[in-house]
Image (cartoon, rainbow, N blue to C red):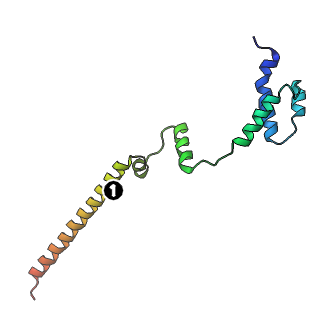
Amino acid sequence: MQTPEQSQMPDMLSTVTDTMLAGKNIDAVLHVYGVSRRQVADFLNVITLLQKSLVGVKPSRRFSNRLKQDLMGAPRMNVITRIRYLPPRVQIAAGVALVAGFLLLLRRRSSDVTSLELAREAESPI
């Protein structure tokens, strides 16, 4: 069974950490919990070292979107999003297929235009 001091330890450490991060004096907090600086000196050193070494970083937009999708469930997927998350080889193959299809359509259209021009020339007397 935990003693009252042990059960209050996480709350005290949390309060001390928040107070230190706010840049305030922790003596009042230690007094509330009935603890001296000497008793928590090791914890204060660890908190100070963590505060100095852990630097805040702004996450990338892509990371934020992915995290939101993971936390909120299935995202709304459109064609571009689906292609974007495919492996690079598949993206390249899809691009090649798209260009080839476009070229085939252009070729067919140009051959249709050419055949129409030939038909008009054949019908009209010169």
Residue type indicated by callout 1: Gly
Q: Residue at x 76, y 25 (%)?
A: 10
Work out whether 66 lies above or below 5: below
Q: Quadrant of the C terminus?
A: bottom left
Count of marks placed on residues: 1
Q: Residues within 10 Å of mark 1 (few under 14, many from 20)?
A: few
As drawn, the residue found furthest toward the top would be 1
Q: Is residue 68 left or right of residue 33?
A: left
Residue 110 pos. (x, y %): 21, 71
Q: Is residue 59 left or right of residue 116?
A: right
Q: Residue at x 87, y 25 (%)?
A: 35
Residue 103 pos. (x, y %): 26, 64
Q: Secondary structure at mark 1?
A: helix
Nearer to me, 2 or 64 = 2
Q: Is residue 59 left or right of residue 85?
A: right
Where residue 20 sits, quadrant-wise, is top right
Q: Residue at x 69, y 45 (%)?
A: 55
As drawn, the residue found furthest toward the bottom would be 126
Nearer to me, 44 or 68 = 44
Q: Quadrant of the N terminus?
A: top right
**Residue at numbered disc 1:** 95
Residue 107 pos. (x, y %): 21, 67
Residue 42 pos. (x, y %): 79, 29
